[in-house]
């Protein structure tokens, strides 16, 4: 069950958020979580200190768990999968600005840098694959 509630505090100091989750139980919940992750990714952008970052990470982890349980995810390293998808789509490193600049993509492909949650969601959205395929199985 996924519950997300927004509360206005007694004092007008802003909105606090509470999220309680256990797991995604249905395809409908899964689709809603993916929509939420996409929306949060757009709002947060590349900020590492955004107030919604924890919710985004929680949402992404729930999606990852569902993907691993319900989809046949190959035992492929994320950088190998990214390289394959780039080749299949005829893309160069500079064609993925939503993930990072050419240098960042190069580091990811070489294994020197891991994909972060924002990048994983951007790649899943671009290539229309479950986000879970980009998580390293060693995690």
Image (cartoon, rainbow, N blue to C red):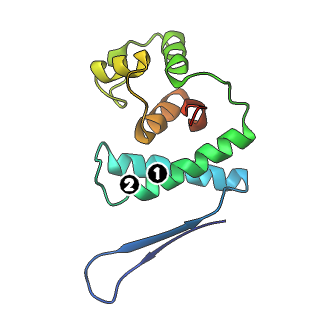
Marks 1 and 2, how far apart in space? 6 Å
Circle on res. 53 = 2
Residue at image point 53% right, 17% down: 80
Residue at image point 48% right, 30% down: 126
**Crowding at mark 1 (Cα within 10 Å: few <14, some 14-19, many 20+):** some
Furthest residue in direction left, as rendered: 13
Residue 60 coordinates in the image, percent (x, y): 52, 48
Residue 95 visible in the shown view: no
Residue 128 coordinates in the image, percent (x, y): 57, 31
Residue 127 coordinates in the image, percent (x, y): 53, 27
Residue 86's place in the image compared with 5, above or below, is above
- Of residues 99 and 27, the one drawn nearer to the viewer in this rendering: 99
Residue 48 visible in the shown view: yes
Q: Is 37 situated left or right of 72 in this image?
A: left
Residue 54's place in the image compared with 66, above or below, is below
User: Dividing the image into 4 quarters, which one contains the N terminus?
Assistant: bottom right
- Locate residue 29: give its quadrant: bottom right
Residue 8 coordinates in the image, percent (x, y): 37, 81
Q: Is 132 situated left or right of 82 in this image?
A: right
User: Dividing the image into 4 quarters, which one contains the C terminus?
Assistant: top right
Q: Secondary structure at mark 2?
A: helix
Furthest residue in direction bottom, as rendered: 10
Q: Secondary structure at mark 1?
A: helix
Question: Disc 1, disc 2: CB below 8 Å?
Answer: yes
């Amino acid at each position: 069950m996924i519950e997300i509630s927004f509360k206005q505090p007694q004092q007008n100091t802003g909105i606090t958020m509470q999220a309680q989750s256990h797991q995604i139980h249905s395809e409908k919940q899964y689709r809603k979580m993916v929509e939420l992750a996409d929306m949060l990714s757009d709002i947060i952008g590349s900020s590492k200190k955004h107030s919604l970052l924890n919710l985004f990470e929680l949402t992404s982890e729930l999606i990852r768990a569902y993907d691993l349980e319900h989809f046949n995810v190959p035992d492929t390293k994320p950088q190998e999968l990214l390289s394959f998808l780039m080749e299949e789509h005829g893309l160069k490193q500079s064609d993925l600005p939503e993930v990072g600049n050419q240098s960042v993509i190069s580091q990811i492909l070489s294994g020197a840098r891991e994909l972060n949650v924002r990048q994983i969601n951007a790649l899943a959205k671009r290539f229309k694959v479950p986000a879970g395929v980009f998580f390293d199985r060693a995690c």
